[in-house]
Image (cartoon, rainbow, N blue to C red):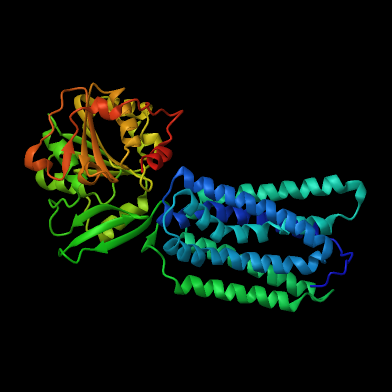
Amino acid sequence: MSDRPISPTALPEWLAVALVAGTSAAVLVLEILAGRLLAPYVGVSLDTYTGIIGTILAGIAAGAWLGGTLADRVDPRRLLPVLLMGGGALAIATIPIVRVLGRTSGSGGGIRILILAAGGFLPAALVLSAVPPAVIKLQLRDLEVTGTTVGRLSAWSTAGAIAGTFGTGFVLVAAAAVTTLIVGVGVLLCLAGIGMWFVGRATRVPDPQAMLSAAALMAVSVAGVAVIDAPCDTQTPYYCVTIRVDDGRAGGRTLVLDRLSHSYVALDDPTHLEFWYVRRLVDVIESAPAARDIVYVGGGGLTIPRYIRATAPTTAQIVLEIDGELVEIVEERLGYVPSESIEVRVGDGRLELAKFDDGSADVVIGDAFGSRAVPFHLATREYVREVERVLRPAGVYAVNIIDGPRRRFLAAEAATFASVFEHVQIVLGSSVVAGGSGNSVIVASNAPLDLPGGPRLQGGELVVDVAALIGDAGVLTDDFAPVDQLIALGS
């Protein structure tokens, strides 16, 4: 590009608005979708979104500075087509970049999140954020209205970002796969760049070499999407879903959500319980004083509801699952057949539980996860009180917990249960007993608990002194529930 300053003609107002609003919207679309793209590698947590938001903000800041600097040195009419084309190509490139980095960046918590977020999304955010200052440079024709011009276009830029945020979170993620949306955004940006390039040819000669370079980058990005395999079979609005076939057992299937094995289903035997913690939750149900009405917060592969339907067909079961597409996958690929004894309600577990009558359940099972963590609003004292309200006087609440060897979250959650229920017991998984990370089960009731031991507890250990395990752990509340941080500290 030439470094000779040029006094370009202003863009039509509608085009200037479309450019600043559209590119800002594209940046925020990428920010929202980044969480789903990174989830198979780093999970979904506050740390994940913190890393993404910080990275995108850094890209916006650097892009605004870069765009303003370039616009003072290069005719913005030459600059804009290249920025649009390059930004679109880099948007598409986020997919293969994250897939490659996700497989090779190892572990490291926050550092790994920043590597994936910065490597995948910082370049696109930077280039696209250079568009608004370049447009503003073109529109500044009269010093008397400089403030008005800058303010108006800045407002439209922010409006575009808001539209991109709301449109993606409320509409787009439910309408198409994440990769489809990202590629779609990239293609639209590239088409806009090509359109501006052709229009610009009528008045001045754009830099063909820069446009060819941007086109080559787009071709490489699209090829990367096609060649580098996705980390899962299906992308739902909430999970990256994979079904793994068990080569050691005919009909054995494992449901993997993001990066964790969530459920095991034996297609030919609903009474087969593969995972240790699932057997313990079934023990809780079968040892409860009564289990006529069971509520599950978190559905997964519906392993336990199938077991109960096969062994106690008159039991009424209600499953609360936030991901409706996951339920469809379980029906289509994991052999679940709906029946009157199992009602599946799609929605957030806490919001749905609030609709239940007082004393309407004998057992509540908690097995909802976002990555390795129980969603924080399902771990607080306020939520546990809601569970107690729904349970009958002798009802039992049991949850599956994943924590590290220091058991920081496990202790805090046990303290939270103990602040609501009179009786609390904990069963540690074998990996936790051995000093590693893994599953444990917390059980609570206002009636005395008598969990089965002996052979049925094989693979786990009943905690004799729950108070000692809790120690000085604080109670989790809606106002303070650092679940992700407690798990990180406990690892």
- The quarter of the rendered structure image containing the N terminus is bottom right
Residue 259 in picture, x, y percent from top left = 36, 55
Residue lying at 56% horizontally and 50% vertically, measured from the top left: 167
Residue lying at 56% horizontally and 75% vertically, measured from the top left: 220
- In the picture shown, does residue 232 fall above or below 195? above
Q: Nearer the viewer, residue 315 or 154?
A: 154
Residue lying at 54% horizontally and 60% vertically, measured from the top left: 120
Determine the image quadrant of residue 289: top left
- In the picture shown, does residue 413 fall above or below 217? above
Q: Single out the residue that lies furthest toward the front.
A: 435
Residue 58 seen in the figure: yes
Determine the image quadrant of residue 464: top left
Total numbered labels placed on residues in the image: 0
Residue 11 seen in the figure: no
Residue lying at 49% horizontally and 51% vertically, measured from the top left: 111
- The quarter of the rendered structure image containing the C terminus is top left
